[in-house]
Image (cartoon, rainbow, N blue to C red):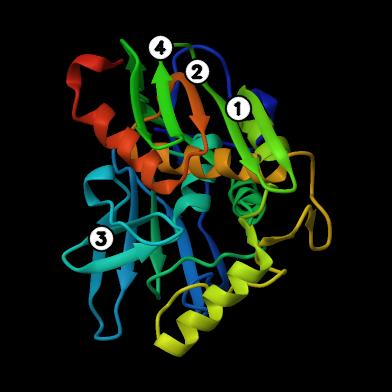
Amino acid sequence: MHQDVPFSRSTFSTGPRRQATLACAFERSGRSLHSGRHATIRVSPAPAGHGIVFRRRLKDGRAVNVPAHWQYRDSQPLSSAVRRDGVLVRTIEHLMASLSALRIDNVLAEIDADELPIFDGSATPWCEAIRAAGRSEQALPCRVIRLRRTVAVESGRRRLQIEPGPGLHITGHIALAHFGSIDWSGAITPEGFEREIAPARSFGRYMRAMAGRAYGYVMGNDFLQGVSPRSAALLVRGHVLGGMRGPGEPVRHRVLDLVGDLALAGHPIEGRVSAFHTGHELNHALVAALMRDGSAWELV
């Protein structure tokens, strides 16, 4: 049983939640951040219980399914990635965050390259595509991970913890030279995510980004080959080239990435998250620590 409904405030009703997929498929193409190559991805509806699965189409004609699940996570610089049977799919965090925040549980994402398009460095293009496709509720209930006690990980000044609480609430903090302390705190809801978090772009220092791109080119590495002011918010001292899209854009992007990385748990997570100078490595460390400690949570 499916119920196709357009996105609106009434789409996300209160009470027990059911699983959902897309009402129809969508396809997007664009240049990737690290490889700099063109990629096309088709995101299609999938049955209840399917989860988020990437299908990588290889040049030899094979197609390999790579589940978007923490057990398949692969460490890659400045991005989130999954790998199965030697087949990599990377820079998945913006799509994962958008699907999670807009409460899409089951899709098949077919891609003809190893990296998703970066677009403008934000999640807004993904949100727009999901909303245009529509949301289809399914018969099975959506089970969520509910915290029983606090779980925390840290590395130097970086600290990330999640404690029991209703819904998903994130408090983020970073401090950047020439910008000072930047903070954001709020509940992750579909409307709030699209309005306050999705527009925030990947960011980095202009000179470091350009040096990284040059290094990758000289060494023949797929690293930041697609970075430019069109694909990221590039910082020059206390300014962003072209201006910020909103107050505290860098910390909002860290929250965006965190939402996408938490989605690799395989079920929506309910809890209050405090994130201090976090990044992909610490995000994934928290997910792994949480999932490996069955006494810290319950599936309800």
Where does label 2 land, which residue?
A: 167
Q: Is residue 262 visible in the rendered structure shown here?
A: yes
N-terminal of the pair, mark 3 or mark 1, is: 3
**Which secondary structure, mark 1?**
loop
The reply to whether the C-beta atoms of the residues labelled 3 and 1 are less than 8 Å apart is: no
Task: Tell me if 113 is positioned left or right of 256 in this view.
Answer: left
Residue type at numbered disc 4? Pro
Q: Find numbered disc 4 in the image and state the secondary structure of the residue it sits on.
A: loop
**Mark 2 vs 3, N-terminal side:** 3
The amino acid type, in three-letter code, at marker 3 is Arg
Q: Are marks 1 and 4 in contact (CB under 8 Å)?
A: no
Of the two numbered discs 1 and 2 on the same chain, state the one appearing first in sequence.
2
The circle on residue 189 is: 1
The residue that mark 3 highlights is: 83
* CA–CA distance in space, label 4 to label 2: 9 Å
Residue 142 x/y as whole percent: 37, 25
Q: Disc 3 and disc 4: Cα gap in Å? A: 31 Å
**CA neighbours of label 1 inside 10 A, class few (<14), some (14 to 19), many (20+):** some
Q: Amino acid at mark 2?
A: Gly
- The reply to whether the C-beta atoms of the residues labelled 1 and 2 are less than 8 Å apart is yes
Q: Position of residue 155 (x, y in %)?
A: 37, 38
Q: Residue at x 71, y 44 (%)?
A: 249
Q: Left or right of 116: which side holds 76?
A: left
Residue 164: assigned label = 4
